[in-house]
Amino acid sequence: MARFTLPRDLYHGKGALEALKEFKGKRAMICVGGGSMKRFGFLDRAKAYLEEAGMQVEIFDGIEPDPSVETVMRGAEAMRAFEPDWIVAIGGGSPIDAAKAMWIKYEYPACTFEDMCKVFGIPALRKKAHFCAVSSTSGTATEVTAFSIITDYAKGIKYPIADFEITPDVAIVDPELAETMPKKLVAHTGMDAMTHSVEAYVSTANSDFTDPLAIHAIEMIQKNLIASYNGDMAARDAMHNAQCLAGMAFTNALLGIVHSMAHKTGAAFADCGAHIIHGAANAMYLPKVIAFNAKDETAKKRYGVIVDYMGIADRNAGDDEKVKALIAYLRKMNDDLNIPHCIKHYGADSYPAEQGFVPEDVFLARLHDIAVNAIADACTGSNPRQPSVEEMEQLLKCCYYDTEVDF
Ligand SMILES: NC(=O)c1ccc[n+]([C@@H]2O[C@H](COP(=O)([O-])OP(=O)(O)OC[C@H]3O[C@@H](n4cnc5c(N)ncnc54)[C@H](O)[C@@H]3O)[C@@H](O)[C@H]2O)c1
Ligand SMILES: [Zn+2]
């Protein structure tokens, strides 16, 4: 038996934020990040709408990018004091993910971070509060997913919390919020969404229910991401929907090893100055993983179907040729978005650089541990081809040097 779960309600289109006016409850806690939502007026608007709905509103702000366990605990403490019956998280993946974890701790104060990380082990929520997510970036789709990514900075590792219990009750997908994104954020979050849809489509947990969502997301991202990056606001709006469709696919079909590798390399070189941004990591690793996974016949056929929908190779071509076309197309997207092809060239501000942040000797010294951690990541199980530690090391090397995957 498989399960397909999404938020009960999804409000979309420009101005959808107004849906907050119709919420029923007594107290709403708004969770936000460092200031972009306040700066652009969305926080004030959300607060006013909730007050119009007759609710008392408190704000928990300052949630940092890639939120920490400590922030989650602080937020839960604030919730225990205010006792909200609605949690409204507004912003990118970071504040929404942090608020999801705070929600668990608020409902179950004895639950430790370790308890939360047990896959599909969260007890029934909604005894104290319901959850609404309003996304301001076009990538993570956390407004519709059963996931939350929290970083343990002591270990330098990102941990996914995964359970349908934390799928929001309400998602608000209002493209106005995404229009203020800086270019680089558009690039990274957009390639994150592309990775979500491609990984969901070839995942071993794919289904008739997730396939159409993944395919339509891929087509929309192909059509709109570069234009959105170059300032086309109609394309920017379309990307906001596309990333959400990708999220609906992957929350139910799961992901693969591109994400396992991104989770385990993201903070692994922080001491070298290289915080490898989630979307940039995915963009660099996706073409390599496609080459690796294509050794699996089923995955290769499914990549071929993606290519047929994208219309980037002759329909009558063989699947090997189609896989090559897909890899070339994605690499060209990275070029157009100014994202490097490999860790070696991952430089300042995540732009390509001749000599990036991560020195070769440091990379090689940490390679084995990263490979072991990546294999243990929750996303590895649904990848179409299961790598050995040795293969994962080889694959990571290809992602460091930008060499071809031929194994
Ligand atoms: N839960 C999931 O399913 C899932 C999936 C993929 C990634 N993630 C996680 O989500 C996090 C990344 O989230 P993200 O990429 O959305 O970025 P983010 O939330 O970390 O935000 C990045 C920066 O962009 C700013 N920002 C956000 N929206 C803006 C806007 N509209 N205009 C201007 N500035 C804006 C923020 O203030 C912040 O400084 C990572 O921790 C990643 O691991 C979660
Ligand atoms: Zn992702």
Image: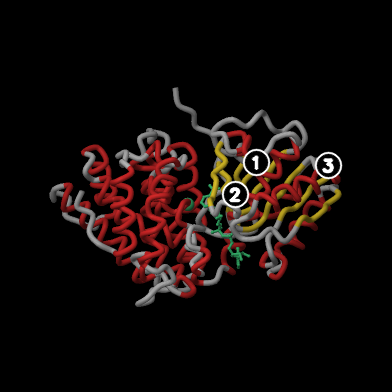
Q: Quadrant of the N terminus?
A: top left
Which three-letter amino acid code belongs to the residue tagged 2?
Answer: Ile
Q: In the rendered view, does 318 fall on the left or right side of 114?
A: left
Q: Give the percent coordinates (x, y) of residue 314.
A: 16, 54
Task: Give coordinates of residue 332: x percent, y percent.
Answer: 30, 67
Could you tell me the amino acid type at mark 1? Phe
Q: Is residue 183 above or below residue 140?
A: below
Identify the mark nearer the N-term, 1 or 3.
3
Q: Residue at x 38, y 41 (%)?
A: 212
Left or right of 114 in this view: 270: left
**Mark 2 / mark 1, whichever is N-terminal:** 1
Secondary element at tag 1: helix
Horizontal and vertical percent position of residue 16:
64, 54
Question: Which label number is shown at residue 150?
Answer: 2
Q: How far apart are labels 1 and 3 at the CA level?
A: 21 Å
Left or right: 115 as drawn, with respect to 328: right
Quick one: label 2 or label 3, which is nearer the N terminus? 3
Q: Is residue 312 left or right of residue 11?
A: left
The residue sitting at 42% across, 46% down in the picture is: 374
In this rendering, the label closer to the viewer, 2 or 3? 2
Contact flag, marks 2 and 1 (Cβ < 8 Å): yes
- Marks 2 and 1 sit apart, C-alpha to C-alpha, by 9 Å
- Mark 1 against mark 3, which lies toward the viewer? 1
Is residue 234 among what the camera can see? no
Q: Secondary structure at mark 3?
A: loop
Can you tell which of label 2 and label 1 is closer to the viewer?
Answer: 1
Circle 3 packing at 10 Å, graded few (<14), some (14-19), many (20+), is some
Element marked by disc 2 = strand
Residue 113, disc? 1
**Residue tagged 3:** 83
Q: Residues within 10 Å of mark 1 (few under 14, many from 20)?
A: some
